[in-house]
Protein backbone atom coordinates (compact mmCIF):
# COMPACT_ATOMS: atom_id res chain seq x y z
CA UNK A 1 0.00 0.00 0.00
CA UNK A 2 1.31 3.42 -0.94
CA UNK A 3 2.25 5.59 2.03
CA UNK A 4 1.64 9.31 2.17
CA UNK A 5 5.37 9.94 2.14
CA UNK A 6 5.83 7.91 -1.03
CA UNK A 7 3.04 9.84 -2.71
CA UNK A 8 4.69 13.09 -1.69
CA UNK A 9 7.98 11.85 -3.15
CA UNK A 10 6.19 11.05 -6.40
CA UNK A 11 4.72 14.54 -6.52
CA UNK A 12 8.14 16.03 -5.90
CA UNK A 13 9.54 14.07 -8.83
CA UNK A 14 6.63 15.25 -10.94
CA UNK A 15 7.22 18.85 -9.99
CA UNK A 16 10.88 18.49 -10.94
CA UNK A 17 10.26 16.78 -14.29
CA UNK A 18 7.08 18.57 -15.32
CA UNK A 19 5.24 15.45 -16.40
CA UNK A 20 4.00 12.07 -15.27
CA UNK A 21 4.87 9.11 -17.43
CA UNK A 22 2.86 5.95 -17.11
CA UNK A 23 4.62 2.79 -18.18
CA UNK A 24 3.05 0.25 -20.45
CA UNK A 25 2.05 -0.35 -24.02
CA UNK A 26 0.69 2.14 -26.53
CA UNK A 27 -2.63 3.89 -26.11
CA UNK A 28 -3.72 2.04 -29.25
CA UNK A 29 -2.18 -1.34 -29.95
CA UNK A 30 -2.42 -1.05 -33.72
CA UNK A 31 -3.46 1.15 -36.64
CA UNK A 32 -5.76 -0.03 -39.42
CA UNK A 33 -5.69 2.30 -42.39
CA UNK A 34 -7.76 2.73 -45.52
CA UNK A 35 -7.43 5.37 -48.22
CA UNK A 36 -5.52 6.56 -51.25
CA UNK A 37 -2.08 8.02 -51.99
CA UNK A 38 -2.22 10.29 -48.94
CA UNK A 39 -1.92 7.16 -46.78
CA UNK A 40 -0.42 4.46 -49.05
CA UNK A 41 2.89 3.24 -47.62
CA UNK A 42 3.72 0.75 -50.38
CA UNK A 43 0.72 -1.20 -51.68
CA UNK A 44 0.83 0.46 -55.11
CA UNK A 45 4.49 -0.52 -55.38
CA UNK A 46 3.59 -4.18 -54.90
CA UNK A 47 0.59 -3.98 -57.23
CA UNK A 48 2.81 -2.44 -59.90
CA UNK A 49 5.16 -5.41 -59.72
CA UNK A 50 2.25 -7.78 -60.16
CA UNK A 51 0.64 -5.86 -63.02
CA UNK A 52 3.98 -4.79 -64.59
CA UNK A 53 2.86 -1.17 -64.65
CA UNK A 54 4.97 1.84 -63.80
CA UNK A 55 3.67 4.71 -61.69
CA UNK A 56 5.45 8.05 -61.07
CA UNK A 57 5.41 7.60 -57.27
CA UNK A 58 7.64 4.55 -57.66
CA UNK A 59 10.48 6.49 -59.29
CA UNK A 60 13.20 8.76 -57.93
CA UNK A 61 13.18 11.35 -56.45
CA UNK A 62 10.17 10.06 -54.47
CA UNK A 63 11.30 8.98 -51.01
CA UNK A 64 14.58 10.89 -51.20
CA UNK A 65 14.15 12.42 -47.73
CA UNK A 66 13.13 9.17 -46.02
CA UNK A 67 15.02 6.04 -47.06
CA UNK A 68 16.74 7.66 -50.04
CA UNK A 69 14.80 5.39 -52.40
CA UNK A 70 11.15 5.23 -53.49
CA UNK A 71 9.09 3.29 -50.94
CA UNK A 72 5.74 3.67 -52.68
CA UNK A 73 4.89 6.79 -50.66
CA UNK A 74 3.80 9.63 -52.93
CA UNK A 75 6.02 12.22 -51.29
CA UNK A 76 9.67 12.96 -50.70
CA UNK A 77 9.41 11.32 -47.27
CA UNK A 78 6.99 10.23 -44.57
CA UNK A 79 3.23 10.61 -44.54
CA UNK A 80 0.75 11.51 -41.79
CA UNK A 81 0.23 7.84 -40.91
CA UNK A 82 3.98 7.38 -40.42
CA UNK A 83 4.22 10.25 -37.94
CA UNK A 84 1.14 8.96 -36.14
CA UNK A 85 2.56 5.45 -35.78
CA UNK A 86 5.86 6.82 -34.47
CA UNK A 87 4.06 9.02 -31.95
CA UNK A 88 2.14 6.02 -30.59
CA UNK A 89 5.30 3.96 -30.22
CA UNK A 90 4.34 1.64 -33.07
CA UNK A 91 6.39 0.42 -35.99
CA UNK A 92 5.64 1.94 -39.38
CA UNK A 93 2.42 0.31 -40.55
CA UNK A 94 3.12 -2.20 -43.34
CA UNK A 95 1.14 -2.13 -46.60
CA UNK A 96 -1.34 -4.94 -47.21
CA UNK A 97 0.29 -5.79 -50.52
CA UNK A 98 3.47 -6.76 -48.76
CA UNK A 99 4.97 -9.32 -51.11
CA UNK A 100 5.09 -9.73 -54.84
CA UNK A 101 2.38 -12.37 -55.20
CA UNK A 102 0.79 -12.43 -51.75
CA UNK A 103 -1.74 -10.14 -50.15
CA UNK A 104 0.10 -9.87 -46.92
CA UNK A 105 1.41 -7.29 -44.51
CA UNK A 106 -0.70 -8.35 -41.57
CA UNK A 107 0.81 -7.27 -38.30
CA UNK A 108 -0.28 -7.19 -34.70
CA UNK A 109 0.57 -3.49 -34.81
CA UNK A 110 -1.67 -2.88 -37.80
CA UNK A 111 -1.96 -3.03 -41.53
CA UNK A 112 -2.42 -0.40 -44.20
CA UNK A 113 -4.93 -1.13 -46.96
CA UNK A 114 -4.63 2.28 -48.63
CA UNK A 115 -3.62 2.29 -52.30
CA UNK A 116 -2.48 5.29 -54.31
CA UNK A 117 -5.13 6.13 -56.89
CA UNK A 118 -7.90 4.43 -54.91
CA UNK A 119 -11.42 5.85 -54.98
CA UNK A 120 -14.32 5.73 -52.57
CA UNK A 121 -16.71 4.66 -55.33
CA UNK A 122 -16.28 1.36 -57.14
CA UNK A 123 -13.99 1.50 -60.16
CA UNK A 124 -16.69 0.07 -62.45
CA UNK A 125 -18.96 3.04 -61.69
CA UNK A 126 -16.26 5.60 -62.51
CA UNK A 127 -14.97 3.81 -65.61
CA UNK A 128 -18.50 3.73 -67.01
CA UNK A 129 -18.60 7.53 -66.78
CA UNK A 130 -14.98 8.16 -67.75
CA UNK A 131 -14.18 5.48 -70.29
CA UNK A 132 -10.86 7.06 -71.24
CA UNK A 133 -9.52 6.66 -67.71
CA UNK A 134 -8.21 3.52 -66.07
CA UNK A 135 -9.28 3.31 -62.43
CA UNK A 136 -7.35 1.17 -59.96
CA UNK A 137 -9.58 -1.58 -58.63
CA UNK A 138 -8.91 -0.72 -54.98
CA UNK A 139 -12.00 1.20 -53.96
CA UNK A 140 -13.03 1.56 -50.33
CA UNK A 141 -15.29 -1.48 -50.64
CA UNK A 142 -12.42 -3.53 -52.07
CA UNK A 143 -10.11 -2.44 -49.25
CA UNK A 144 -12.74 -3.40 -46.69
CA UNK A 145 -13.00 -6.86 -48.25
CA UNK A 146 -9.22 -7.23 -48.10
CA UNK A 147 -9.41 -6.35 -44.42
CA UNK A 148 -12.07 -8.98 -43.73
CA UNK A 149 -10.13 -11.64 -45.63
CA UNK A 150 -6.90 -10.92 -43.78
CA UNK A 151 -8.38 -10.89 -40.27
CA UNK A 152 -7.83 -14.62 -39.57
CA UNK A 153 -4.11 -14.26 -40.28
CA UNK A 154 -3.90 -11.22 -37.97
CA UNK A 155 -5.98 -12.16 -34.98
CA UNK A 156 -7.30 -15.70 -35.40
CA UNK A 157 -10.83 -16.28 -34.11
CA UNK A 158 -13.86 -13.98 -34.05
CA UNK A 159 -13.50 -13.02 -30.38
CA UNK A 160 -9.81 -12.12 -30.70
CA UNK A 161 -10.49 -10.19 -33.89
CA UNK A 162 -13.23 -8.14 -32.25
CA UNK A 163 -10.79 -7.24 -29.47
CA UNK A 164 -8.11 -6.44 -32.05
CA UNK A 165 -10.43 -4.14 -33.98
CA UNK A 166 -11.71 -2.53 -30.79
CA UNK A 167 -8.23 -1.70 -29.52
CA UNK A 168 -7.05 -0.41 -32.90
CA UNK A 169 -7.06 3.14 -34.17
CA UNK A 170 -8.82 3.04 -37.53
CA UNK A 171 -7.99 5.68 -40.16
CA UNK A 172 -10.59 6.17 -42.87
CA UNK A 173 -8.51 7.85 -45.54
CA UNK A 174 -8.46 10.56 -46.70
CA UNK A 175 -10.62 9.07 -49.47
CA UNK A 176 -12.74 10.64 -52.20
CA UNK A 177 -10.24 13.03 -53.74
CA UNK A 178 -9.61 10.76 -56.71
CA UNK A 179 -13.35 10.40 -57.35
CA UNK A 180 -13.56 14.14 -57.89
CA UNK A 181 -10.36 14.44 -59.91
CA UNK A 182 -11.87 12.68 -62.93
CA UNK A 183 -14.29 15.50 -63.79
CA UNK A 184 -12.28 18.34 -62.26
CA UNK A 185 -8.90 17.72 -63.90
CA UNK A 186 -10.45 17.57 -67.38
CA UNK A 187 -12.24 20.86 -66.92
CA UNK A 188 -15.81 19.65 -66.31
CA UNK A 189 -18.11 22.01 -64.39
CA UNK A 190 -17.84 21.78 -60.63
CA UNK A 191 -21.49 20.77 -60.48
CA UNK A 192 -20.56 17.51 -62.23
CA UNK A 193 -18.14 16.67 -59.40
CA UNK A 194 -20.63 17.96 -56.85
CA UNK A 195 -23.12 15.30 -57.92
CA UNK A 196 -20.63 12.66 -56.74
CA UNK A 197 -20.29 14.05 -53.22
CA UNK A 198 -23.38 12.42 -51.63
CA UNK A 199 -22.37 9.09 -53.20
CA UNK A 200 -18.82 9.37 -51.86
CA UNK A 201 -20.03 10.36 -48.39
CA UNK A 202 -22.54 7.50 -48.29
CA UNK A 203 -19.77 5.04 -49.17
CA UNK A 204 -17.55 6.35 -46.38
CA UNK A 205 -20.42 6.27 -43.89
CA UNK A 206 -21.40 2.75 -44.91
CA UNK A 207 -17.83 1.56 -44.35
CA UNK A 208 -17.65 3.29 -40.96
CA UNK A 209 -20.88 1.63 -39.87
CA UNK A 210 -19.70 -1.78 -41.01
CA UNK A 211 -16.45 -1.40 -39.08
CA UNK A 212 -18.40 -0.37 -35.97
CA UNK A 213 -20.50 -3.52 -36.36
CA UNK A 214 -17.23 -5.48 -36.46
CA UNK A 215 -16.16 -3.97 -33.13
CA UNK A 216 -14.40 -0.70 -34.02
CA UNK A 217 -14.30 1.73 -31.08
CA UNK A 218 -12.08 4.57 -32.35
CA UNK A 219 -12.21 5.81 -35.93
CA UNK A 220 -10.58 8.87 -37.48
CA UNK A 221 -12.41 10.14 -40.56
CA UNK A 222 -10.57 12.91 -42.44
CA UNK A 223 -12.14 15.57 -44.58
CA UNK A 224 -10.71 16.72 -47.88
CA UNK A 225 -7.79 19.09 -48.31
CA UNK A 226 -8.32 22.58 -49.77
CA UNK A 227 -7.89 21.37 -53.36
CA UNK A 228 -8.09 24.93 -54.67
CA UNK A 229 -4.55 25.35 -53.34
CA UNK A 230 -3.21 22.30 -55.22
CA UNK A 231 -0.64 22.98 -57.94
CA UNK A 232 -2.38 20.51 -60.25
CA UNK A 233 -5.75 22.26 -60.04
CA UNK A 234 -4.19 25.72 -60.13
CA UNK A 235 -2.62 24.66 -63.43
CA UNK A 236 -5.45 22.72 -65.09
CA UNK A 237 -8.25 25.04 -63.95
CA UNK A 238 -6.44 28.36 -64.17
CA UNK A 239 -8.52 31.46 -64.82
CA UNK A 240 -7.92 34.95 -66.18
CA UNK A 241 -10.49 36.27 -63.72
CA UNK A 242 -8.68 37.47 -60.61
CA UNK A 243 -11.93 37.34 -58.65
CA UNK A 244 -11.76 33.53 -58.76
CA UNK A 245 -8.61 33.55 -56.59
CA UNK A 246 -8.37 34.12 -52.85
CA UNK A 247 -6.34 37.35 -52.49
CA UNK A 248 -4.70 36.04 -49.29
CA UNK A 249 -3.65 32.59 -50.42
CA UNK A 250 -3.81 32.62 -54.23
CA UNK A 251 -6.01 29.50 -54.11
CA UNK A 252 -9.04 28.92 -56.34
CA UNK A 253 -12.09 29.93 -54.31
CA UNK A 254 -14.66 27.71 -56.01
CA UNK A 255 -12.58 24.55 -55.58
CA UNK A 256 -12.02 25.25 -51.90
CA UNK A 257 -15.74 25.85 -51.48
CA UNK A 258 -16.29 22.48 -53.16
CA UNK A 259 -13.96 20.81 -50.63
CA UNK A 260 -15.83 22.51 -47.79
CA UNK A 261 -19.12 21.22 -49.22
CA UNK A 262 -17.74 17.66 -49.03
CA UNK A 263 -16.45 18.25 -45.51
CA UNK A 264 -19.67 19.79 -44.19
CA UNK A 265 -21.78 16.94 -45.53
CA UNK A 266 -19.34 14.41 -44.07
CA UNK A 267 -19.52 16.02 -40.62
CA UNK A 268 -23.32 16.02 -40.72
CA UNK A 269 -23.30 12.28 -41.41
CA UNK A 270 -20.71 11.62 -38.70
CA UNK A 271 -22.89 13.43 -36.16
CA UNK A 272 -25.75 11.11 -37.10
CA UNK A 273 -23.52 8.08 -36.47
CA UNK A 274 -22.51 9.50 -33.08
CA UNK A 275 -26.16 9.70 -32.07
CA UNK A 276 -26.67 6.03 -32.93
CA UNK A 277 -23.35 4.88 -31.42
CA UNK A 278 -22.58 7.16 -28.45
CA UNK A 279 -20.13 4.57 -27.09
CA UNK A 280 -17.92 4.82 -30.19
CA UNK A 281 -15.26 7.52 -30.49
CA UNK A 282 -15.72 8.95 -33.97
CA UNK A 283 -13.14 11.62 -34.72
CA UNK A 284 -13.38 14.09 -37.59
CA UNK A 285 -9.92 15.10 -38.82
CA UNK A 286 -10.02 18.60 -40.25
CA UNK A 287 -7.42 18.26 -43.00
CA UNK A 288 -8.79 21.39 -44.64
CA UNK A 289 -8.10 23.89 -41.87
CA UNK A 290 -4.96 22.13 -40.66
CA UNK A 291 -3.52 22.75 -44.13
CA UNK A 292 -4.96 26.25 -44.51
CA UNK A 293 -2.60 27.35 -41.74
CA UNK A 294 0.40 27.22 -44.02
CA UNK A 295 -1.46 28.25 -47.16
CA UNK A 296 -2.33 31.48 -45.40
CA UNK A 297 1.10 32.02 -43.79
CA UNK A 298 3.71 29.77 -45.42
CA UNK A 299 6.71 31.69 -44.10
CA UNK A 300 5.58 31.23 -40.50
CA UNK A 301 5.94 27.47 -40.97
CA UNK A 302 9.29 27.61 -42.75
CA UNK A 303 7.93 27.29 -46.29
CA UNK A 304 10.06 30.07 -47.70
CA UNK A 305 9.44 28.88 -51.26
CA UNK A 306 5.73 29.28 -50.81
CA UNK A 307 2.77 26.95 -50.60
CA UNK A 308 1.53 26.71 -54.18
CA UNK A 309 4.50 25.81 -56.36
CA UNK A 310 5.55 22.17 -56.53
CA UNK A 311 9.07 21.14 -55.59
CA UNK A 312 9.21 18.43 -58.26
CA UNK A 313 7.53 18.75 -61.65
CA UNK A 314 7.48 19.98 -65.21
CA UNK A 315 8.06 23.70 -64.88
CA UNK A 316 5.40 26.36 -65.51
CA UNK A 317 3.99 28.83 -62.96
CA UNK A 318 3.39 26.06 -60.40
CA UNK A 319 6.03 23.59 -61.66
CA UNK A 320 3.26 21.20 -62.70
CA UNK A 321 2.74 19.78 -66.16
CA UNK A 322 0.54 16.85 -67.16
CA UNK A 323 3.08 15.80 -69.78
CA UNK A 324 6.15 16.06 -67.54
CA UNK A 325 5.45 14.59 -64.12
CA UNK A 326 7.73 14.29 -61.12
CA UNK A 327 9.73 11.13 -61.73
CA UNK A 328 10.22 11.82 -65.44
CA UNK A 329 13.80 12.32 -66.58
CA UNK A 330 13.10 15.88 -67.72
CA UNK A 331 11.33 16.91 -64.50
CA UNK A 332 12.93 19.54 -62.29
CA UNK A 333 13.48 18.97 -58.58
CA UNK A 334 14.07 21.61 -55.92
CA UNK A 335 17.10 21.49 -53.63
CA UNK A 336 15.23 22.09 -50.37
CA UNK A 337 11.88 20.26 -50.31
CA UNK A 338 11.34 21.18 -46.66
CA UNK A 339 10.84 24.78 -47.79
CA UNK A 340 7.94 23.74 -50.04
CA UNK A 341 4.40 22.69 -49.14
CA UNK A 342 3.71 20.92 -52.42
CA UNK A 343 5.86 18.01 -53.55
CA UNK A 344 4.68 16.95 -57.02
CA UNK A 345 1.65 19.08 -57.83
CA UNK A 346 -0.79 16.65 -56.18
CA UNK A 347 0.85 15.47 -52.97
CA UNK A 348 2.56 17.39 -50.18
CA UNK A 349 6.09 17.28 -48.81
CA UNK A 350 7.12 15.42 -45.68
CA UNK A 351 7.50 18.78 -43.92
CA UNK A 352 3.88 19.71 -44.72
CA UNK A 353 2.55 16.32 -43.64
CA UNK A 354 4.43 16.61 -40.36
CA UNK A 355 2.76 19.94 -39.59
CA UNK A 356 -0.65 18.49 -40.46
CA UNK A 357 0.01 15.48 -38.23
CA UNK A 358 0.90 17.71 -35.28
CA UNK A 359 -2.08 19.98 -35.90
CA UNK A 360 -4.43 16.99 -35.95
CA UNK A 361 -3.14 14.54 -33.38
CA UNK A 362 -1.31 16.89 -31.02
CA UNK A 363 -3.32 20.03 -31.70
CA UNK A 364 -6.88 21.35 -32.09
CA UNK A 365 -7.82 20.17 -35.60
CA UNK A 366 -9.78 17.05 -34.72
CA UNK A 367 -13.33 16.84 -33.33
CA UNK A 368 -13.24 15.67 -30.59
CA UNK A 369 -9.59 16.47 -29.93
CA UNK A 370 -7.47 13.36 -30.29
CA UNK A 371 -4.86 14.62 -27.83
CA UNK A 372 -7.43 14.69 -25.01
CA UNK A 373 -9.02 11.36 -25.93
CA UNK A 374 -6.11 8.97 -26.01
CA UNK A 375 -5.56 8.68 -22.26
CA UNK A 376 -9.27 8.38 -21.49
CA UNK A 377 -9.76 5.74 -24.16
CA UNK A 378 -6.85 3.71 -22.83
CA UNK A 379 -8.18 3.72 -19.29
CA UNK A 380 -11.71 2.87 -20.35
CA UNK A 381 -10.44 -0.16 -22.21
CA UNK A 382 -8.02 -1.30 -19.55
CA UNK A 383 -5.01 -0.43 -21.72
CA UNK A 384 -1.93 1.05 -20.10
CA UNK A 385 -0.64 4.34 -21.39
CA UNK A 386 2.55 4.34 -23.39
CA UNK A 387 5.77 5.78 -22.05
CA UNK A 388 5.52 8.62 -24.52
CA UNK A 389 1.99 9.54 -23.43
CA UNK A 390 2.24 11.83 -20.43
CA UNK A 391 -0.08 13.84 -18.25
CA UNK A 392 1.42 17.30 -17.99
CA UNK A 393 1.05 19.15 -14.75
CA UNK A 394 0.31 22.84 -14.83
CA UNK A 395 2.09 25.27 -12.55
CA UNK A 396 -0.23 28.24 -12.83
CA UNK A 397 -1.93 27.19 -9.60
CA UNK A 398 1.42 27.16 -7.74
CA UNK A 399 2.12 30.70 -8.89
CA UNK A 400 -1.37 31.71 -7.86
CA UNK A 401 -0.99 30.17 -4.41
CA UNK A 402 2.45 31.65 -3.86
CA UNK A 403 1.14 35.08 -4.83
CA UNK A 404 -1.58 34.71 -2.24
CA UNK A 405 0.91 33.55 0.39
CA UNK A 406 3.26 36.46 -0.19
CA UNK A 407 0.81 39.32 -0.56
CA UNK A 408 -2.43 38.41 1.17
CA UNK A 409 -2.96 39.19 4.83
CA UNK A 410 -5.08 36.07 5.26
CA UNK A 411 -4.51 32.84 3.38
CA UNK A 412 -7.52 30.70 2.37
CA UNK A 413 -5.45 27.53 2.65
CA UNK A 414 -4.44 28.15 6.26
CA UNK A 415 -0.78 29.08 5.73
CA UNK A 416 -0.84 31.98 8.16
CA UNK A 417 2.95 31.96 8.32
CA UNK A 418 3.10 32.53 4.57
CA UNK A 419 5.00 30.54 1.98
CA UNK A 420 8.67 31.46 2.06
CA UNK A 421 9.89 30.93 5.62
CA UNK A 422 10.85 27.39 6.62
CA UNK A 423 9.25 25.77 9.66
CA UNK A 424 12.46 23.93 10.60
CA UNK A 425 15.92 25.37 10.13
CA UNK A 426 18.78 27.54 11.24
CA UNK A 427 17.14 30.89 11.83
CA UNK A 428 17.68 33.93 9.61
CA UNK A 429 15.16 35.69 7.39
CA UNK A 430 13.82 32.43 5.99
CA UNK A 431 14.89 30.15 8.85
CA UNK A 432 17.42 28.49 6.55
CA UNK A 433 21.15 28.20 7.14
CA UNK A 434 23.63 25.96 5.34
CA UNK A 435 25.58 25.48 8.56
CA UNK A 436 22.54 24.69 10.70
CA UNK A 437 20.08 22.42 8.89
CA UNK A 438 16.79 21.01 10.10
CA UNK A 439 17.74 18.00 12.23
CA UNK A 440 20.71 19.67 13.84
CA UNK A 441 20.55 20.06 17.62
CA UNK A 442 20.54 23.84 17.39
CA UNK A 443 17.90 24.08 14.66
CA UNK A 444 14.61 25.74 15.49
CA UNK A 445 11.26 24.09 14.75
CA UNK A 446 7.91 25.85 14.49
CA UNK A 447 4.99 24.84 16.69
CA UNK A 448 2.40 24.64 13.88
CA UNK A 449 3.91 23.20 10.68
CA UNK A 450 0.47 23.09 9.02
CA UNK A 451 0.57 26.91 8.91
CA UNK A 452 3.78 26.83 6.83
CA UNK A 453 4.32 25.94 3.17
CA UNK A 454 8.06 25.26 3.52
CA UNK A 455 9.31 22.57 5.88
CA UNK A 456 13.11 22.69 5.89
CA UNK A 457 14.12 25.27 3.31
CA UNK A 458 14.06 22.73 0.46
CA UNK A 459 11.00 20.54 0.96
CA UNK A 460 7.40 21.40 1.67
CA UNK A 461 5.14 20.53 4.58
CA UNK A 462 2.56 17.79 4.54
CA UNK A 463 -0.16 20.45 4.42
CA UNK A 464 1.34 21.93 1.25
CA UNK A 465 1.72 18.53 -0.40
CA UNK A 466 -1.88 17.75 0.46
CA UNK A 467 -3.09 20.84 -1.43
CA UNK A 468 -0.87 19.99 -4.40
CA UNK A 469 -2.22 16.45 -4.40
CA UNK A 470 -5.83 17.63 -4.41
CA UNK A 471 -5.15 20.29 -7.04
CA UNK A 472 -3.59 17.70 -9.35
CA UNK A 473 -5.50 14.48 -8.89
CA UNK A 474 -8.86 15.87 -7.76
CA UNK A 475 -8.71 19.27 -9.42
CA UNK A 476 -8.08 21.00 -12.75
CA UNK A 477 -4.27 21.10 -12.86
CA UNK A 478 -3.50 18.13 -15.10
CA UNK A 479 -3.88 17.98 -18.86
CA UNK A 480 -6.04 15.99 -19.52
CA UNK A 481 -7.72 16.16 -16.13
CA UNK A 482 -6.84 13.10 -14.07
CA UNK A 483 -10.14 13.10 -12.22
CA UNK A 484 -12.05 12.74 -15.51
CA UNK A 485 -9.97 9.69 -16.39
CA UNK A 486 -10.68 7.89 -13.14
CA UNK A 487 -14.39 8.53 -12.88
CA UNK A 488 -15.40 5.86 -15.36
CA UNK A 489 -13.29 3.16 -13.70
CA UNK A 490 -14.36 4.12 -10.20
CA UNK A 491 -18.03 4.13 -11.11
CA UNK A 492 -17.70 0.55 -12.27
CA UNK A 493 -17.02 -0.34 -8.64
CA UNK A 494 -19.85 1.82 -7.42
CA UNK A 495 -17.48 4.37 -5.89
CA UNK A 496 -17.51 8.14 -6.11
CA UNK A 497 -13.75 8.47 -5.81
CA UNK A 498 -13.96 12.25 -5.50
CA UNK A 499 -15.78 11.75 -2.20
CA UNK A 500 -12.79 9.92 -0.74
CA UNK A 501 -10.96 11.96 1.85
CA UNK A 502 -7.26 12.52 1.66
CA UNK A 503 -6.48 9.78 4.18
CA UNK A 504 -9.03 7.41 2.62
CA UNK A 505 -6.68 6.99 -0.31
CA UNK A 506 -4.13 5.34 1.97
CA UNK A 507 -6.46 3.32 4.17
CA UNK A 508 -6.92 -0.42 4.01
CA UNK A 509 -10.65 0.17 3.40
CA UNK A 510 -10.09 2.20 0.23
CA UNK A 511 -12.46 0.50 -2.27
CA UNK A 512 -10.16 1.48 -5.11
CA UNK A 513 -7.12 -0.08 -3.50
CA UNK A 514 -5.11 -2.30 -5.79
CA UNK A 515 -6.21 -0.79 -9.09
CA UNK A 516 -3.34 -0.40 -11.54
CA UNK A 517 -3.21 1.74 -14.66
CA UNK A 518 -4.12 -1.27 -16.77
CA UNK A 519 -7.41 -1.81 -14.94
CA UNK A 520 -8.22 1.51 -13.39
CA UNK A 521 -6.27 3.93 -11.27
CA UNK A 522 -2.58 4.25 -10.69
Image: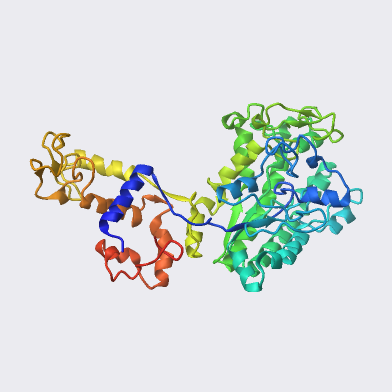
Q: Quadrant of the N terminus?
A: bottom left
Residue 128 appears in which quarter of the rendering? Answer: bottom right
Give the percent coordinates (x, y) of residue 92: 64, 49
Q: Viewed as shown, does residue 250 lie left or right of 85?
A: right
Q: How many marks?
A: 0
Q: Is residue 208 above or below residue 132?
A: below
Name the residue: 15% across, 36% down. Answer: 430
Residue 126 appears in which quarter of the rendering? Answer: bottom right
**Closest to the observer, 5 or 446:** 5
Q: Is residue 193 visible?
A: no
Outermost residue, right side: 132
The image's colouring method is rainbow
Q: Is residue 381 above or below residue 438?
A: below
Q: Is residue 343 above or below residue 128?
A: above
Q: Viewed as shown, does residue 384 lie left or right of 271?
A: left
Q: Is residue 55 visible?
A: yes
Give the percent coordinates (x, y) of residue 293: 59, 37
Name the residue: 65% across, 70% down. Answer: 213
Q: Viewed as shown, does residue 372 lie left or right of 265?
A: left
**Closest to the observer, 298 or 485:** 485
Give the percent coordinates (x, y) of residue 416: 14, 46
**Closest to the observer, 217 or 412:** 217
Give the percent coordinates (x, y) of residue 440: 12, 42
Q: Quadrant of the C terminus?
A: bottom left
Residue 129 appears in which quarter of the rendering? Answer: bottom right
Amino acid sequence: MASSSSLFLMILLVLCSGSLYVSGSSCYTSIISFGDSLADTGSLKQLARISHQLYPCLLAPYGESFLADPTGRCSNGRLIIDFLAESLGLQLIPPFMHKLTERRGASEQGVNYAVAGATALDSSFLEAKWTENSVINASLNVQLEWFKQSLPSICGNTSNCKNFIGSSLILMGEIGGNDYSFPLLVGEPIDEAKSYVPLVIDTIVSTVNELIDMGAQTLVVPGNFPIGCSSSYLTTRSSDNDDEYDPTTGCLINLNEFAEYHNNLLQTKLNQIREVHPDVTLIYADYYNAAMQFYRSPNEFGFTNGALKACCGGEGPFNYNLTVRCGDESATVCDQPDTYVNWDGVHLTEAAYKIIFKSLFQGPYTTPQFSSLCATTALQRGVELSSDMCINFEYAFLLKLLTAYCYCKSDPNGFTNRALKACCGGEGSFNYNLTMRCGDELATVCDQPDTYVNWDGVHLTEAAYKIIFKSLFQGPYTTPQFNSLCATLASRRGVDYRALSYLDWFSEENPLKGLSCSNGLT
